[in-house]
Image (cartoon, rainbow, N blue to C red):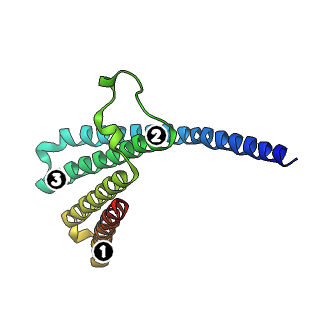
Amino acid sequence: MSEDLSRLEERIRRNLGRVMVAARWIMAPLYIGLLAGLVLVVAKFVQVLVRSVPQLPTQTSNETIYAVLTLVDLTLVANLVVIVIFAGWENFVGRLLEGPTGERPAWLGGLDFSAVKLKLLGSIATVAAILILETFLHITEVSQAQTMLQIAILIAIGVVGVLMAVMDRIGSNHGEK
């Protein structure tokens, strides 16, 4: 009887393990949705670019800088989406681009959780900094309280990034001992 119970437990454990591993495919529609979001960001980028080019001869320097900062901001958001898609798929769903050795980019395997976390925080900090630059371009239209809040958020993001990098460093050093 004990042996039968043991075999049953093993079978349940094995089948539950298979279900859990197969459940990772539940994430696939989310990454496909992020691809759609990336298309939206690209469409907005093109829209801003197409709207800005004809206005260039009559734009002030601040308006041109604002348009360029908007393009940079959209590019950074697109980078964030791509990082999340690649890292998430690679870490949770499965390897991308299985096949001949030359087909798979070398950087794709280096997207572990720590690297992605720091890349995301760096990109978020950059996006926040660009928003502050945009605020300074329109400083007369923005309240001092709102400007200070944006600066505080940027500093907080920076502090969190540094703390996460320190924790990763401590964790990697701890693992070596």
Q: Nearer the viewer, residue 24 or 27?
A: 24
Query: What is the CA distance from the residue labelled 3 to the residue labelled 2?
Result: 36 Å
Q: Is residue 165 above or below residue 10?
A: below
Provide the residue designation for mark 3: 65
Q: Three-letter amino acid code at disc 1?
A: Ala
As drawn, the label of residue 136 is none
Q: Is residue 48 above or below residue 166?
A: above
For the point 55% across and 42% down, the residue is: 27
Q: Is residue 37 visible?
A: no
Q: Quadrant of residue 171?
A: bottom left
Q: Three-letter amino acid code at disc 2?
A: Trp
For the point 60% across and 41% down, the residue is: 21
Mark with earlier residue (3, 2): 3
In the displayed structure image, the side of residue 112 where residue 52 appears, left or right = left
Mark with earlier residue (1, 3): 3
Q: Three-letter amino acid code at disc 3?
A: Ile
Provide the residue designation for mark 2: 89
State which mark lies toward you, 1 or 3: 1
Q: Position of residue 98 (x, y in %)?
A: 42, 26
Provide the residue designation for mark 1: 152
Is the residue marked by circle 1 packed among few (<14), some (14-19), or many (20+) residues within 10 Å? few
Q: Position of residue 130 (x, y in %)?
A: 24, 59
In the picture, the quarter occupied by the C terminus is bottom left
Residue placed farthest to the bottom in the image? 145
For the point 53% across and 42% down, the residue is: 30
Mark with earlier residue (1, 2): 2
